[in-house]
Amino acid sequence: MKLLLLLLPLYVFSIDLDYTINQIKTHEGFKSKPYVDNGHYSIGYGINLSHVTKAEANLLLTHRLSIRYEQLKAHRWFNNLSPTRQQVILNMTYQLGYSGILKFKKMVWALSHNYYNGAANEMINSRWYRQSGYRAKTLVQQMKTNKRS
């Protein structure tokens, strides 16, 4: 529902928005990495990064989470987790990337065998845990208890 509210303003235009979007894409060009444009960092199709709104950041976050979630759903071990534990893995995957989470081979093995304390221990015994502070401690606790904090 929140996503729909973010997109709702697009439907109030009385012009052909698709044409305008395609024209802007042609004029701006696409760049996947930040670049300097008139003294400001931009990305994508000329999106000025110094003026990103919270709504835009939320839209990007939601989009990226949906991609990661679809990737994770390809794994039986992920589908067999409780929603809380799935959220732990999704949070970690957002931070580390899809290929990054798959490097936690012992954690994945523990999860596939319903050994949640073992999975939590593998999380603790990682560089990710040492570098992620409060986030890591929270996620480990959720993995162990199956409760959101």
Image (tube, rainbow, N blue to C red):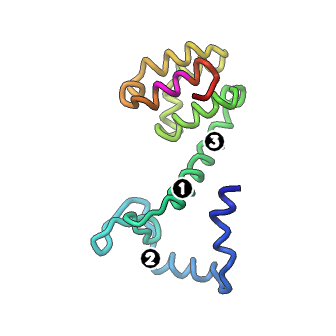
Find numbered disc 3 in the image and state the secondary structure of the residue it sits on: helix
Q: Residues within 10 Å of mark 1 (few under 14, many from 20)?
A: few
Quadrant holding the N terminus: bottom right
Whether the magenta-drawn stretch holds residue 140 is answered as yes
Give the residues in magenta.
137-141
The amino acid at mark 1 is Leu
Q: Which residue bears the numbered disc 2?
A: 28
Q: Nearer the viewer, residue 133 or 20?
A: 133
Quick one: label 2 or label 1, which is nearer the N terminus?
A: 2
Spot occupied by residue 137 in the image (x, y as percentages of width and height) = 46, 24
The residue where tag 3 is placed is 69
**Quick one: quadrant of the C terminus?**
top right
User: Viewed as shown, does residue 111 lie left or right of 40?
Assistant: right
Of the image marks 1 and 3, the number of the one nearer the N terminus: 1
The quadrant holding residue 29 is: bottom left
Q: Position of residue 118 (x, y in %)?
A: 55, 13
- Which three-letter amino acid code belongs to the residue tagged 3? Tyr
Q: CA distance from mark 1 to mark 3?
A: 14 Å
**For the view shown, which residue lies furthest in the front direction?**
149
For disc 2, the neighbor class at 10 Å (few under 14, some 14 to 19, many from 20) is few
Mark identifier at residue 60:
1
Q: Is residue 53 left or right of residue 77?
A: left
User: Of the residues under marks 3 and 2, which one precedes in the sequence?
Assistant: 2
